Image (tube, rainbow, N blue to C red):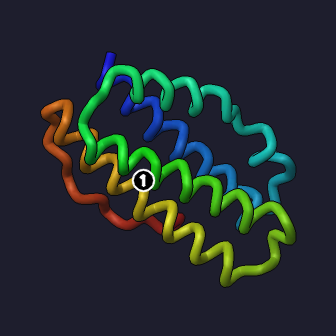
Amino acid sequence: MLLEQCAQLVARSEDYRNRVWEERRLGARDAVSAWDLSEFRLASARLKLLCRDADVLKSLQRLHKAGEDLGKAWRPAAGDSDAVDAAWRGHRIALDDFVRHSGDLVGGRVVPRVRASRE
């Protein structure tokens, strides 16, 4: 169950990033607003109930904050490239940190990310 919640949070976060990218680079409309935040919140709540590892919980808090920051930077004008770029990088760092800590917790071997063009 712990692995499932960690995986759900990573998947939901990557989906969120992809939606911002689609709006930003491809001109998609309403992709971010259609993102299901409730699934992210549910997985977060489950992880908080199941996990007592301080590093994982701290990295989850950082991921949540980075997601908020990205949303705040993206929503107002979607045109302030510097603010969005900074929030985008911050979210990637927080997500990678969460993957590392949750992977350590569930005993997975965490492989360093290969940087993709959407980063």
Closer-to-camera residue (61/24) = 61
- Report the residue at 53% width, 64% height from top: 118
Residue 27 position within the rendered picture, expressed as x and y whole percent measured from the top left: 81, 61
Q: Is 91 situated above or below 63?
A: below
Q: Indicate the quadrant where residue 5 lies.
A: top left
Residue 79: image location, x then y, percent:
81, 77
Q: Position of residue 33 (x, y in %)?
A: 80, 44
Q: Whole-percent x and y of residue 18?
A: 61, 51
**Residue at 63% across / 62% down in the picture?**
69
Q: Hey, what amino acid is under mark 1?
A: Leu
Q: In the image shown, does 91 or 60 lie closer to the viewer?
A: 60
Residue 2 found in image quarter: top left
Q: What residue lies at 41% left-to-right and 64% top-to-bottom?
A: 93
Q: Quadrant of the N terminus?
A: top left
Residue beneath disc 1: 95
Identify which residue is drawn at 42% across, 58% down.
94
Q: Residue furthest top?
A: 1
Left or right? Give the position of 106 relative to 88.
Answer: left
109 horizontally vs 27: left or right: left
User: How many numbered badges does the structure rendering display?
Assistant: 1
